[in-house]
Image (cartoon, rainbow, N blue to C red):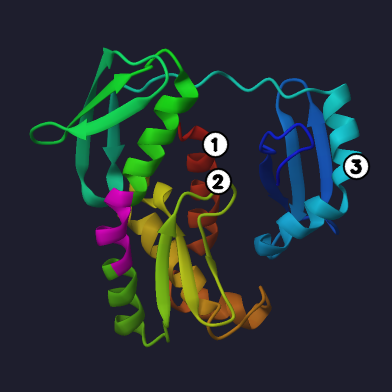
Amino acid sequence: MLLSDGTELMFRVRAHANARRVSFLFSRREGMVVRIPRGFDRNRIPGILEQHREAIEAALRKYPMRPEPFQRPERIVLQAIGEEWTIEYESGNSRHVTLAQRGEQRLHISGAIDRPELVRRVLQRWLVLKARPHLIPWLRNVAQELGFPLKGATVRFQRTLWASCSHRDTVSLNARLLLVPPASVRYVFIHELAHTRHRNHSREFWQVVAAHVPDYRAKRTELQKLWNALEI
């Protein structure tokens, strides 16, 4: 969601077993946290945020978010596919940032490298391009292996979700999945594929997930920790 000043709303999502509804918490240290009940459909969050736009903006004026500035990484570890890329930087054009692959698993970023958000954007675009040929065939193989219908798949850079499944059985994957261990990626795949049978997070839905990922609760906790730790 874009705020009235044109900036993107940044927030964290935390699931709590004793939460009965969606609520918002604000602090100068953490910024905005969206508190949701366990099993809540995260695809509903954007709509809820829009409904409470005025209250959210008023709270952010009182507790302005102070996120840590983006630090240019010297390397990127793609745990999902077992690759580690080193990054070298070269100052140049003051308005643009370009990225090129140089040699084996080496990235060269040049231009306005003192503008961290521009550096972050080119890394995000590279991650999406890198993820597509890996994540989409992987997802299709899992769907075929386990007998789930899958009409289509896309990869993009999502700010709040690891993945989502549409009512047409199309799964949208977050390129950040390349940054997490293979077992966690597989869990996300199965979670979304299970939505092709159950559109909600009902008991029946979790039974389908548990049939293929018995330790899914541990995987959910791990993914939340990984999300908060990711730099890109």
User: Residue at left 47%, top 65%?
Assistant: 172
The mark closer to the camera, 1 or 3, is: 3
Please name the amino acid that badge 3 sits on: Glu
Q: CA distance from mark 1 to mark 3?
A: 26 Å
Q: Position of residue 159 (x, y in %)?
A: 56, 46
Task: State the residue position of label 1.
Answer: 228
Task: State the residue position of label 2.
Answer: 224
Label 3 neighbour load within 10 Å: few <14, some 14-19, many 20+: few
- Vertical relation: 60 (above or below) 47: above
User: Residue at left 50%, top 63%?
Assistant: 216
User: Residue at left 41%, top 82%?
Assistant: 150
Q: Is residue 210 visible?
A: no
Task: State the residue position of label 3.
Answer: 54
Left or right: 151 as drawn, with respect to 145: right
Asked whether 135 falls inside the magenta stretch, the response is: yes
Question: In the image, which residues are magenta?
Answer: 129-136
Q: Are marks 1 and 3 in contact (CB under 8 Å)?
A: no
